[in-house]
Amino acid sequence: MLKKYNCNMKNKKILISGASIAGPTLAYWLHRYGFTVTVVERAPELRLGGQNIDVKGPAKEVALKMGIVEKIRARNTTEVGLRFVDSQNETLAEFPSDSSMSMTQELEILRGDLVKILYEQSSKDVNYIFGDHIVHLKETEDDIGVEFKSGKKEAFSIVISAEGIGSATRDLAFGSRPHYKYLGLHTAYLTIPKKSTDSRWARWYNAPRGIVFMLRPDNYGENRASVTFLAKENEYKDLPEDRQKKVLISHLNGTGWESERLINEIEDSKDFYFERVSQVKAKQWSKGRVVITGDAAWCATPIAGKGTDLAMAGAYVLAGELSKAEDHYEAFKNYEKIMRPYVDKCQKLPPGIPGIVYPESKWGVTLLNKVVKIAGSKPVKYVMNLFSGTEKEDKKDFVLPNYENNFK
């Protein structure tokens, strides 16, 4: 049985590992509550790559409380909506950003731009350390000793992993990895130059063999490309990047649309990303003085469309609970009690995913395209708007607690 130590909250010295979205959001709020905060990031600088993400629901509410909504709006990706296209680039259906059926949200931003905004909002009050990471943890009755790769040693009241799905700090603290639920898909991302076929519309194309292409405009005059395809879980495990690129090219060959363009760009890509699509199903989010948040705790995958919602809401709740609790044990328990139902809800995918959206046969693609075309027709859009309203609104599927009384 885990021994319950006093957190000594008067010390209020906290280490966060990870400077993506959850980490800097958490650092901002912990500082507001009077904690002394250090953020350590393994990369030598902020990781500013990544695809489009949306700030909606609880993430938008947290952003409003932080006073950064207009900064996010100013760095909008310029995307005006989503078009489904066929192999000849003919539009099958289009859903503008104000449509209830559109993927494009009011606050659409590149992941790297949001990371930079969150860092700028917290960096004046928080100690950021880049190019280092945790290699050893030793908990005592009064604190938790941390040894870094650089050789530096320091004691903290609490250590928080706000790392990614493969969090090394989480695995070090818990002694093992959580369960990963593989969704039957691999995905690849890269940035490519803009061409005459591109516009401010995102384009979605289905190809046989269970492949989905997406090209989305960004606010830097380029396109963010993604390719997601059906594959066995460990089919391409631990491949070096050059082999990953060859695998992706082999999947793209002969698939039509803009596939040749992508093939030509893959070899020289400087921000290429290739990985399995898996959810994190962690039975516990804390052990002793260590707690996890963000993708390290509950990665929902881009398919769920809730990554930013969960990252920012989870960081806000964890900081708030730490600000009012008598000790870390109570804070971690309340944090999980509040967040666990929302995480479970966000990780639930619609029936038939991924099979329906990633058909393997030409007949399946043809059928899906017909369904999309019907969904994009004026009569269907009209009926959908009767039920959802003509304007897209944030759904209150999670209510943020109020911790304002705990500001320092």
Image: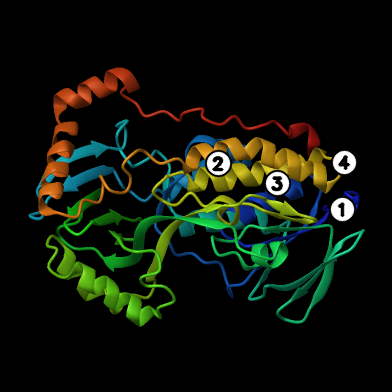
Q: Identify which residue is drawn at 37% across, 75% down.
A: 270
- Name the quarter where the C terminus is drawn: top right
Q: Label 1 sits on what residue type?
A: Lys
Q: Identify which residue is drawn at 36% across, 51% down.
A: 77
User: Camera-side residue: 3 or 273?
Assistant: 3
User: Residue beneath label 2, please?
Assistant: 343
Q: Earlier in the sequence, mark 1 or mark 3?
A: 1
User: Residue beneath label 1, please?
Assistant: 3
User: Residue beneath label 4, please?
Assistant: 326
In contact (CB < 8 Å): disc 3 and disc 4: no
Q: Position of residue 19 (x, y in %)?
A: 61, 61
In contact (CB < 8 Å): disc 2 and disc 4: no
Which tag is nearer the camera, tag 2 or tag 4? 2
Crowd around label 1: few <14 · some 14–19 · many ≥20 (10 Å): few
Q: SS at mark 4?
A: loop
Q: Position of residue 106 (x, y in %)?
A: 39, 38
42 to 161, vertically: above or below: below
Q: Identify which residue is drawn at 72% across, 45% down.
A: 319
